[in-house]
Image (cartoon, grey):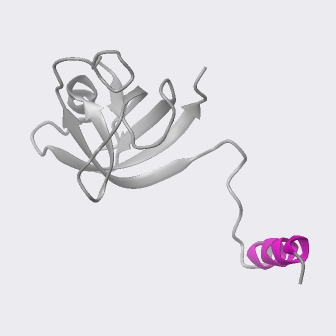
Amino acid sequence: MTKFSRAASLAVAMAVCGLAFPAAGHAAWTGKASYYNLKGKTASGGRVGHMTAAHRSLPFGAKLRVTNLANKRSVVVIVNDRGPFIGGRIIDVSKGAAQALGMINAGVARVHVMRVASAR
């Protein structure tokens, strides 16, 4: 079976089961977030801002909507650092973003992260 026919078969099977592929260019993750209050320069050479974040692989400048699943609060952050470096976490947000998300007291929150714009 060729790669094309395998992909076509998978697409048909997903359609029959009511599953859909995400729209091109839309990436999203769900997992744990933590926050940090770094003093000094980030991996991008900048500084931690009011609404910034660290992500392991997304390009610097990527905009992400982070939603706290416990209280539905949401913010848009800009990736300007690398991390988190603790297993099981998908993003670190700045202290300002954590305050807006209502996660300061807990320190960690279950979040949904969606990319809203490309790096420029």
- Above or below for 88 versus 117: below
In the image, residue 16 sits, relative to residue 92, either above or below, namely: below
Q: Residue at x 14, y 43 (%)?
A: 107
- The front one of 73 and 113 is 113
| Count of marks placed on residues | 0
Q: Specify the quadrant of the image occupied by residue 9.
A: bottom right
Is 34 inside the magenta-drawn segment? no
* Residue farthest left in this picture: 105
Image side of residue 72 versus residue 105, left or right:
right
Find the magenta span and give its range.
Answer: 3-14
Q: Is 34 located above or below residue 94 in the figure?
A: below
**Residue 95 x/y as whole percent:** 20, 27
Residue at left offset 90%, top offset 77%: 2
Q: 61 or 17, which lies in front?
A: 61
Magenta segment main secondary structure: helix
On the picture, is 9 further left or further right than 27?
right
Residue 23 screen position, x and y as percent: 71, 49
With respect to residue 55, does 47 lie above or below?
above
Relative side of 41 to 112, left or right:
left
Estimate the x, y position of residue 69 in percent, counting from the top left: 34, 50
In the rendered structure, does residue 4 fall within the stretch colored magenta? yes
State the residue at coordinates (80%, 71%).
11
| Percent coordinates x, y for residue 112 in the rendering | 41, 48
